[in-house]
Each structure stands twice: as structure tokens, then as C-alpha cells.
Amino acid sequence: MYAVALTGVLALVVTVSAGVGPVSIPAVEVAQVILNAVRLPVGVEFTGGGSGLLRVPSVEILTHAPFGFAVDDTHTAIVRTVRLPRILLAAFVGVALAAAGTVMQGFFRNPMADPSIVGVSSGAATGAVASIVLPFALPFGIGLQLAAFLGGIVAGFAVYLIATRDGRTPTATLLLVGVAIQTLLSAVVSAMILFSGDSMRRVVFWLMGHLKNAGWGDVAAAAVVVPPLVVALAAYARDLNVLLLGEVDASALGVDVERSKRALLAISSVLTGAAVAVAGVIGFVGLIVPHGVRLLVGPDHRVLLPTSALAGGSFLVAADTVARAGTIELPVGIVTAAAGAPFFLYLLRTREVYEL
Amino acid sequence: MTSVLDATDLRVRLGGESVLGGVSLSVERGEFVGLVGPNGAGKTTLLHTLNGTRLPDAGAVRVDGEPVGGQSSREVARQVATVPQETTLSFSFSVADVVEMGRTPYVSRFGTTTPADHEAVERAMTAAEVAEFADRSVQTLSGGERQRVLLARALAQETETLLLDEPTASLDINHQVRTLELVADAVADGRAVVAAIHDLDLAARYCDRLLLLADGGIRAAGEPGSVLASDALQTAFGVPTELSEDPTTGTPRVTAVTDRGSTPSEDGPAPDAE
């Protein structure tokens, strides 16, 4: 029920957000633009395929949005080539970070856990900054995004390997190794910034998190990576619930503890790495959204994970809208922190808060 | 052969120290076996080895003749359920949610719970007398209620073997007796039960058989009266004891004797910390 409502909220936020910018476009018109776009592939299929049972829904969409609303061409172009890719990317990144954050908080049974806790974000930052700062091009034509993604995965994997002994990975050890690796990598990043010279501004902007210059290519990549991985995490929601009761208990209840931990860690790391690669280090979404949603829907991850993911998408779209609405564009990381922290404090004060 | 749980020559070392030095036991259906012994005797370790969460360095545990070591934790969890001494219930799960977690070994990763699962949960909650507060958060429960919720969770696993680690340790006498009565009901249903119980009088009152565990080995085994009367008991606890008959229940009662006079065994060793 929450999930349905939040899907509606996400759709609404996306629509409203696409109207905000230097050229203001009413939400209704945005919806028309989007619906016009929805019609396109359907129309091609319809004319090519003729009639048939399976085509019936397509015909219905056509009648609901018949031959496009009369929309200004400029507005259509703005919405479709400039704003929508950015907004959809924000939604995917928000979904990824909130889902990964939810899993990490449950996994570590620690309210301070967020997606960056096992060093993935730091690793991604190191990779990205290296690709900007280093005077030579990285081998194999690795670009900034791939460098960031690989950096994140390598860092996460290194943390896991260091924390694992005899096939067991105690979460406390993992947490501490993650903190140590984060510290080490932030030293590396600081050193690189010091010697970055002319590209320093670009580095700092990237580190603060941004969704500028998002294109449909990024959206397509995110669409391939994020939804399947969130579904994969959802498949482990029951295990995660049982793990909250402790690992010995979980094992006695039939959960293959080490295997589930590996899967949860790997999937959330890839999600985080992908999100950071396309959008930089956006803090707070993965920390605050899961907390806020948990206060509302409770600790059951079968409910919490999907709702938190959808709320994360809406939150980041809204935050990015604020970030780009002003005369000077802010890095979205600043907005998420500035808006998220007070809202979170409000929730803490008004709701009865249990552990985690 | 009717024994459902068999352990042969279990040896476990923890951090270089031998905790279990060759423990063998077998439990039959409908039998309530009490595990008694001083703190640090290895009772909890033995239970963890029996339910497969800890692999022994040597020896084997068999459930229904099948070695536990060769099975997935999911398969084992359909045969052996455990009521832990303490569990982290600091999350606002409802009682029904926690009991439903007992169905974990039956629910597939991508599936959801079936009507059969819900029936099992209902039965378990009724049997453990927690059905009336099924919707309450586990955080609002008293110690005795929480213990029954954990018992319900284990019953929902619908296993033939039930292991309990100090189920009465932190309960008042009313809840101690009430919890053990529920366990005795589970035994009457044909389950094989092994429970670590530090209260010797309660163990003698409810168990069919006692195993005295001390220094990683079984020092005495058999009828409660014979185990409690044995010299091994005095050696294991390091205190002279006297055996009498409880006038109300007619079951054996152990009294520790000290220089200052006698103290009842309830004031004896505190439960194993874990």
C-alpha cells in the first residue's frame, strides 16, 4: 500500500520537477509531453502489426493521449532532451542509494551505516579523481565513470577480503576495515586534489555530487543496473529480517548467514558504485531516507526496502530540482544534506524512535 | 532405532582451549533431556554444535541418522529448532512477525508465506500462549513473554527436535514453571527436547533424563535422582550437596551445603553468559 502511494509520489515529483527551471512549464504540459512520448513506440507497433489481442492495450493508450497534445516544440525539447534524462537519472540514483543504505543499516545493525560504509564511495571517488587529475590517460580508454565504478568495486572487495578470515566475515571487523580504508582513500584523494592544479574545481564539484550533463545514455545504463539489483536485494529481505536477530539465531533458523551476507554486500556495493559513478558522492540520501521510512513503516525489510527505495528516488529528484532551480546551480549533495538533516531531526523528535 | 538426535564423540576447541572433549549423547522422540552443569561447562557450545551452527572439530551430530555437517542450514533448520538464551529483540517487529521467522526454512527466496505457514504460526502461537498479544511489538513484552515468543518461533519451525538454552534463566518462578510446562507439552507431542537448565530442582522436576556436563565432558547421565545423587555432581560444582525430596512435587531437591549452613541451589551459579 505504501509502495503504491510512493510510486504515485515519485511519478508526481518527476512530472512537477520537469516543469521547474529557467523556462517554467506547467505540470500538466509536462505530463502531456511525457504521454506524447509514451505514444510513440506504441504507434509504430500498431501500424506495423495491425490488430490483435496483444495490441489492445496499445490502442487504449492512443485513445487516452490521442495524437499528442498540442505542446510547444521548444517545451517538448527542453523536457525531453534536457530535463527528463537528468530527472530520471536522479530517480535511479536515489533509488540505488536508499536501497543500499537500507540494506547496510540492517546488515550492520548500526544506525550510522550508509552505502559508503564499506569503502565503495571512497573507492569510486578515488577512481574518478584519479581519472581527472592524473596527467596521463588511464589504460584501455577507461573514462571517469568507469574509473569511478571500478574504484568503488575494488575498494569494496578489498574491504571484504581483509575482513574475512576462515570464510567468516564478522560485521564489526568489516565496519572497522571499512572505516580504515575510507580514511586511507580520503588521504589519497586529498593528496590528488592538492596536485590537481587547474582541474581542482571540476574535482570538487564531482566530489560534492551532481547530476549535471546527464544524458539518455546514463539513464539507460542506470535502468539496466538499478532495478534488477534492487529486486535482487528484495529477494534477501527475509534473510535480512532474520539477520537482525543475530547471526547465530539466523543460522539456527536456516539462513546461510555467510552466503546471504556476501550477496547483500556485493549487490549493495555494485548499486552504490554505479550511483556514485554517474552522480558523484551524494551523501545523506542513503543514511536519512531509510531512517525516515523505517520510522513510518517499521523494520520489516520486505516492506521497508521497496518503500525506502521509492522514497529515495523521490527525495533525490526533489533535491536536484532545488539544486538546479536557482540562478547558480548547486551540487545536489549540498541540497540533500541541507534539507535532509533538519527533516530527519524533525522525525526523530516527533516519532517514537527505537533502536535502529 | 528410535533416537532422533545422536551425537558421537564431539570435540570442540575455542581459541585453543578444549571446550568439549568427547561428548556423546542420543535423544529419543518424546524424551525431555536436561543438560545441567556449572558455568563454563560447555552447555551452550554443545547446543550450538547440536543445531549445526558450530561445526565440531571432531565427532558428528546425526539427526534422523543424517549427519548435520553435510546438510545446509536450511535443511537442518527443518529438523532442529533452537530457543536461544537471549536474542536481540530490539526491533519493533510484532510478535507474529517474529514467530513467522520460524517459517524461514520453508519459504523460498522468491516466494511468500503460504496458508500452511500461517496455520503453523497460529498453532505455535496458541501452543506457546502468545496468541493474545500477536500484534504487539516484541519490545513491549516482559522477559517471560519474550521467552514464550522465542519458544513459539521454534515451535513454528515444526521440527522433531527442540533445543533450549537456559529457557528459565531470567524468569520468576511463575514463568519458570509455565515455560517448562509448555516445553513438556511439546515433549508430549512427540518432540525430542534437550534443554540446558541451571536450576537443578526444576531440571529434576521436568526432565526424563539428566546429563551432567562439566569440564567439557559428560560426568553423569541417567534418571534425575541418580544424577543428582552422584558424587560427580559435588565434584562438578565444587560444593558438597545434600539430596532430599521436595514435599510438594515429590521430585529430587538439591541443597548446597556450606560452612555457614545450607543454601538452596537457586542461589547457586548464575546462568552462563553468552
Image: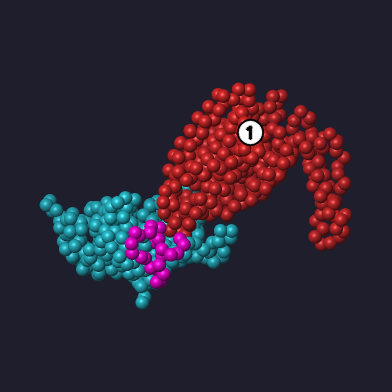
Chain colours: A red, B cyan
Q: Chain of mark 1?
A: A
- The residue depicted at 79 percent of the width and 34 percent of the height is A78
Identify whether A21 is placed above or below A356: above
Looking at the picture, how far across and down is residue A38, in whole percent? 79, 47
Left or right: B96 with respect to A29? left
Q: Is residue A3 visible?
A: yes
Q: How many discs appear?
A: 1
Name the residue type under label 1: Ala
Taking the spot 62% from the left edge, 35% from the top edge, the residue there is A138
Q: Is residue A128 above or below residue B240?
A: above
Where is residue B59 drawn, in percent x and y? Answer: 33, 64
Determine the secondary structure under disc 1: loop
In the depicted view, which residue is nearer to us: A94 or A146?
Answer: A146
Closest to the observer, B196 or A53: A53
Residue that carries the numbered disc 1 in the rendered image:
A137
- Between A115 and A192, the one lying in front of the other is A192
Which range is magenta?
Answer: B51-73
